[in-house]
Amino acid sequence: MDSRFEIETTKIVKEEDEVNEYDECPIKQVELTVPKTDDPTLPIVTFRMWVLGILSCVILSFVNQFFWYRTQPLSITSISAQIAVVPLGHFMARVLPTRVFFKDTWFEFSMNRGPFNIKEHVLITIFANAGAGTVYATHVLSAVKLIYKRKLGFLPAILLMLTTQVLGFGWAGLFRKYLVEPAEMWWPSNLVQVSLFSALHEKSKRPKGATSRTQFFLLVLISALAYYVLPGYMFSMLTSFSWICWLGPKSIFVQQLGSGMRGLGIAAFGFDWSTISSYLGSPLASPWFATANIAVGYLFMGNGTVYDISSIVNSDFHLDRDAYAKNGPVHLSTFFAMTYGLGFATLSATIVHVLLFHGREIWMQSKRAFGDHKKMDIHTKLMKKYKSVPMWWFHIILVANIALIIFICEYYNESLQLPWWGVLLACAIAITFTLPIGIIYSTTNQEPGLNIITEYIIGYMYPEHPVANMCFKVYGYISMNQALTFLQDFKLGHYMKIPPRTMFMAQVVGTFISVLVYTGTAWWLMETIPDLCDTSKLPSDSPWTCPMDNVFYDASVIWGLVGPRRIFGNLGEYSNVNWFFLAGAIAPFLVWLAQKAFPGQTWIRLINMPVLLGATSMMPPATAVNFTSWIVVGFISGFVVYRYKQDWWKRYNYVLSGGLDAGTAFMTILLFLTLGSNNIMLNWWGNNVEGCPLATCPTVKDIFVKGCPVL
């Protein structure tokens, strides 16, 4: 179906006619990056779009799930597909037949609508986005089947995966007026893709004495592709260059200080883009004030000890209280306990921060939502020519999905454990926090998570049920997370002037396809790889240790099996951690007071306590070197280059990010398929990762660990 059926007017908007009549965008980065023109006659829903979009979604879903179980998880972003489809799109435009069937009817169809255009390209990327983000509920499958070693059927597994992804559509529909249309909600990471679209479809000639963005992107892509052979295969020590360890080759203390992957990471740095961007995303896409908050909030602590969890689980998959009393309580490492404490603080800080700093804007936006006079930036005004997605579409999806969730949780209660009231409570939490967390994410590129508070609540209300705790978390947290993903895609379509109904269609279809592929891939790996994720049985150099799944499993033990009352309550050792809730609520208030007391100091308003306190949310499994490297690169890009070389930053910054992502991803896959899968390795000291073998040794006397000196 041609895109003209989505358009209420066919007038082509020209920059010269429209820009001066409309408000400029108040966000400078958007003003410098996003084009202010639109051509509503471009065909969008084309044969090319369907073929390349579905192909991108399937490939990314498979690759990301395949690599997710590996010791060094690799996440291939949609940027890779965004680049790869360009030559394919142009090739299809040249060779496919142009005959039009059922012309001038609703069924009009052609395999070739003319030149491959930027709007088709955007929609293909939306399909790729659906396959690029992991399906969080896969952790539930992995924890139950691989680590707890309990039975879980394929049908409840795929229904669990599907409903967690689709539930977010409902929340997205409710909050799109607040998180998409306002110019202040600018979603920084979208600007990377906007810059790439402009570069890949740029028709202007190369500026005199400079390179075009397309040329620059190709140079970065080829350079990143070639360079990654070093950290990815020939010289893996570049992944974490921990030179301080060399100062004390026989000292446990020195190596624990210097190790970037197993210690404090002092002066450690990763000369590897996958190390820099793996957990916090591209530092080139993060505004400097958010990067600074991450830097201040980043703490360094120690590691914990091993507990035999299988000994305290009874045959009904509940806590064996007698065995737990005999074995003793579960102890958390200082770092793990602090991570949870900061998670508590982040939650309360998010609420107070939004009320103090964005409360008035939310109230005014609420009033404008019911009025006829709305102040819009140029991009929102240009989008008004397209039909919006009716609210009842979202309402139907929301109600039907909640009903399906309640059914599967009741029907498969023996496997999933979550009661019907738990489903409704999870939905209530998600809908409450989607707006405040969406405001933080859309303005800072950092997303405070709900995982801890969801675990906390259900852990108290329904203790000793580990699977119920995991399911409650994915419905309470991931539905919100998925809603923000949909809203971010809507904003990308908003910037690129894609009809909202067409965007909605691509998101729905892409979500269903990605769930099927993710589930199928995970199930296949679970059935074919011996001892997948079981670190107690796998060799130390195994690539299948599943770091993310093991962290998820640990959380299910703490919050679900043992329960927060025995950890953070009156029966536990860590009750003082609850004071972080109060500290988190007070922190933004102090910033607000400082801003009122010193109105001339504009930098005070840039202090974002939810981002600062939530800086360690990805640790574990992220390590010190991931954070230090990310902060250094973010400072260079977001502060130094943006301040002193703004013209260069405007033209090349986001293109650089995309080229590094794509080059690293392509070479990683190539190395695995050609060398890694055949166990062809180079054994020399440069591939000894970071050269800190003693960093994991205990420092307590009279403990002997193989490979460590006797203390």
Image (cartoon, helix red, strand yellow):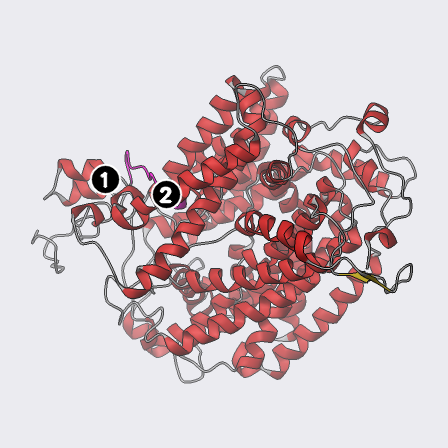
The magenta segment is 265-274
The kind of residue tagged 2 is Ala
Question: Which secondary structure class fits the magenta region best?
Answer: loop
272 drawn magenta? yes
**Residue at which label 2 appears:** 226
In this rendering, does residue 135 appear at all? no
Question: Relative to residue 403, is residue 273 drawn left or right?
Answer: left
* Badge 1 density bin: few <14, some 14–19, many ≥20, Cα 10 Å: many
- Name the residue: 41% across, 67% down: 557
Image height of 520 relative to 387, above or below: below
Would you name the residue on which mark 1 appears?
257
Q: Residues within 10 Å of mark 2 (few under 14, many from 20)?
A: few
Q: Quadrant of the N terminus?
A: bottom right
* Residue closest to the eye, 570 or 505: 505
Magenta-drawn stretch contains 499 = no
Give the CA separation, mark 1 to mark 2. Answer: 32 Å
Of helix, strand and loop, which one carries label 2?
Answer: helix
- Left or right of 499 on screen, residue 283: left
311 is higher (above) or lower (below) than 484: below
Q: Nearer the viewer, residue 601 or 593?
A: 601
Question: Mark 1 or 2 closer to N-term?
Answer: 2
Q: Amino acid at mark 1?
A: Leu
Report the side of 478 relative to 218 (left or right).
Answer: right
Mark 1 secondary-structure assignment: helix
**Most distant residue in the left direction:** 710
Query: Whole-percent x and y of residue 463?
Result: 50, 70
Q: How many marks?
A: 2
Label annotation for residue 172: none
Residue positioned 40% across, 47% down in the render = 338
Depth check, mark 1 against mark 2: the one in front is 2
